[in-house]
Image: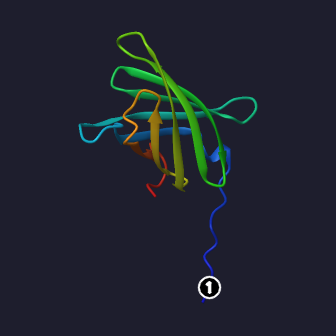
């Protein structure tokens, strides 16, 4: 019986754009689609930007042991600043599976997201 060697991922492997499908932090409701762009700063910390329709959300985060954590914020249509945290499990080099919560969201639920790398790579 042979052991399957797991591919080691680095923070540099995460850089790129991902197609996002998610659900909000509520019991039910419409799903959303968008793009998540990940890049690195000079200290190899994650810089994240979600584009969901005409809304932009920004975040910063870190990566360890195939887990990506991003603290995010955005300004709503009523000009309030909302903040939260997203946590992703890196299923593969091209797929992130995560959940998120924001300060004023329904505390009984978590939002969810699945992200698949766009362009040029294998899907899974």
Q: Is residue 25 above or below residue 4?
A: above
Taking the spot 61% from the left edge, 54% from the top edge, the residue there is 66
Q: Secondary structure at mark 1?
A: loop
Using the image as rendered, state which of residue 49 and residue 16 is in the foreground.
49
Residue 22: image quadrant is top left
Q: Position of residue 60 (x, y in %)?
A: 61, 30
Q: Which residue is mark 1?
A: 2
Which part of the image, by quadrant, shows the N terminus?
Answer: bottom right
Q: Is residue 45 left or right of residue 87?
A: right
Q: Few, some or many C-alpha atoms within 10 Å of disc 1 (few <14, some 14-19, many ≥20)?
A: few
Residue 42: image quadrant is top right
How is the protein colored in the picture?
rainbow
Taking the spot 40% from the left edge, 42% from the top edge, the residue there is 110
Using the image as rendered, state which of residue 124 and residue 65 is in the foreground.
65
Taking the spot 43% from the left edge, 13% from the top edge, the residue there is 80
Taking the spot 37% from the left edge, 42% from the top edge, the residue there is 109
Name, please, the residue furthest toward the left. 29
Q: Position of residue 97 (x, y in %)?
A: 46, 50
């Amino acid at each position: 019986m042979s052991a399957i060697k797991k591919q080691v991922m680095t923070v540099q492997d995460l850089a790129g754009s991902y197609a996002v499908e998610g659900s909000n932090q509520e019991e039910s409701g419409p799903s959303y689609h968008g793009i998540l762009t990940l890049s690195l700063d000079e200290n190899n910390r994650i810089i994240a930007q979600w584009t969901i329709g005409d809304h932009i959300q920004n975040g910063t985060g870190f990566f360890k042991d195939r887990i990506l954590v991003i603290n995010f914020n955005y300004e709503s249509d009523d000009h309030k600043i909302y903040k939260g945290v997203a946590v992703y499990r890196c299923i593969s080099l091209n797929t992130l599976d995560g959940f998120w919560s924001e300060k004023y969201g329904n505390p009984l639920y978590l939002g969810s997201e699945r992200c698949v790398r766009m362009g040029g790579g294998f899907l899974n």
